[in-house]
């Protein structure tokens, strides 16, 4: 792929902007300044240095973000900053968006991509992709509440019961809850349905991905694809 096309595909700006970056000597590879926008490069394993920072080529971006509290999973937030402000401009330019949403006060693992097929695969209930939530509750959690969450509870706007794929009482006020659906405020509403209340909510895993313990809140990492 031509160098100018690579930069454009990675979200570094319009074709004119990409030509300008190359002309200004801002793009390197293996220590060499790349000054020909028409130079063909093998994108397999390609890592460019753009404005002094490494940038691995990804035909489709898949990003793992440690979402902090106080951010909305929306391109047009209403009351708090968007999680998109935590990403560098090239990722925002190429149109990545959250795969599902976390409430503004919910923290933890959030995936983003511009791959519409992958978004559908990971959010469609029929694919049963598990997501694990660490739930801090206001009142002590009883065995009966755990059993009801596993058996299924009815939410206000849906006559069909929804149930946890797994549910474990970690401590008196800490519940680990696994869901394979993504209904609006589902965790909070399920816990309310068993006469308790969510005080804190943190997503610790999504599918096979676990939030890295060394990834600080507000920081992100590339994910190298999703299993077929």
Image (cartoon, helix red, strand yellow):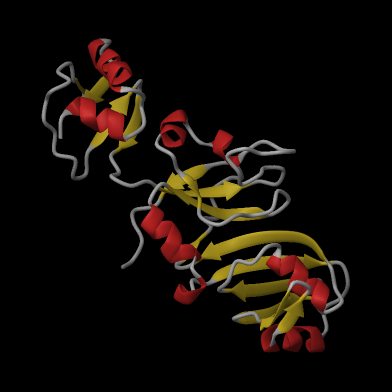
Which quadrant would the C terminus be assigned to in this image? Answer: bottom left
Residue 206 visible to an observer of this rendering? yes
Where is residue 143 drawn, in percent x and y?
79, 88
Compare residues 117 and 82 and report the one nearer the observer. Answer: 117
Q: Quadrant of the N terminus?
A: top left
Q: Residue at x 68, y 86 (%)?
A: 150
Q: Is residue 172 visible?
A: no
Is 48 located above or below residue 122 in the figure? above
Residue 188 location, quadrant? bottom right
- The image shows residue 145, relative to residue 190, as above or below, that is below
The image shows residue 66 at horizontal and vertical percentages of 57, 49
Q: Which quadrant holds residue 12? A: top left
In the displayed structure, does residue 96 sit left or right of residue 205?
Answer: left
The answer to which of 138 and 5 lies nearer the viewer is 5
The residue drawn where x is 47% and y is 32% is 88
Q: Nearer the viewer, residue 161 or 49?
A: 161
């Amino acid at each position: 792929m031509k160098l100018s096309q690579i930069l454009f595909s990675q979200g570094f700006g319009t074709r004119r902007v990409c030509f300008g970056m190359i002309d200004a000597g801002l793009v390197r590879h293996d220590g060499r300044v790349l000054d020909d926008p028409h130079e063909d490069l093998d994108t397999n394993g390609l890592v460019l240095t753009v404005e002094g920072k490494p940038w691995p080529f990804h035909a489709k971006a898949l990003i793992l973000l440690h979402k902090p509290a106080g951010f909305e999973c929306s391109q047009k937030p209403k009351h708090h900053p968007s999680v998109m402000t935590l990403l560098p401009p090239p990722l925002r330019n190429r149109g990545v968006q959250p795969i599902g949403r976390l409430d503004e006060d919910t923290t933890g693992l959030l995936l983003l991509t511009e791959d519409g097929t992958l978004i559908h695969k990971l959010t469609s209930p029929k694919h049963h992709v598990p997501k694990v939530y660490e739930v801090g509750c206001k009142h002590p959690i009883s065995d009966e509440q755990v059993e009801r969450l596993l058996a299924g509870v009815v939410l206000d706007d849906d006559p069909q019961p929804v149930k946890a794929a797994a549910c474990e009482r970690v401590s008196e006020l800490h519940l680990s809850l696994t869901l394979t659906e993504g209904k609006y405020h589902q965790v909070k509403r399920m816990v309310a349905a068993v006469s308790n209340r969510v005080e804190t909510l943190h997503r610790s895993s999504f599918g096979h991905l676990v939030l890295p313990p060394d990834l600080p809140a507000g920081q992100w990492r590339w994910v190298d694809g999703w299993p077929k």
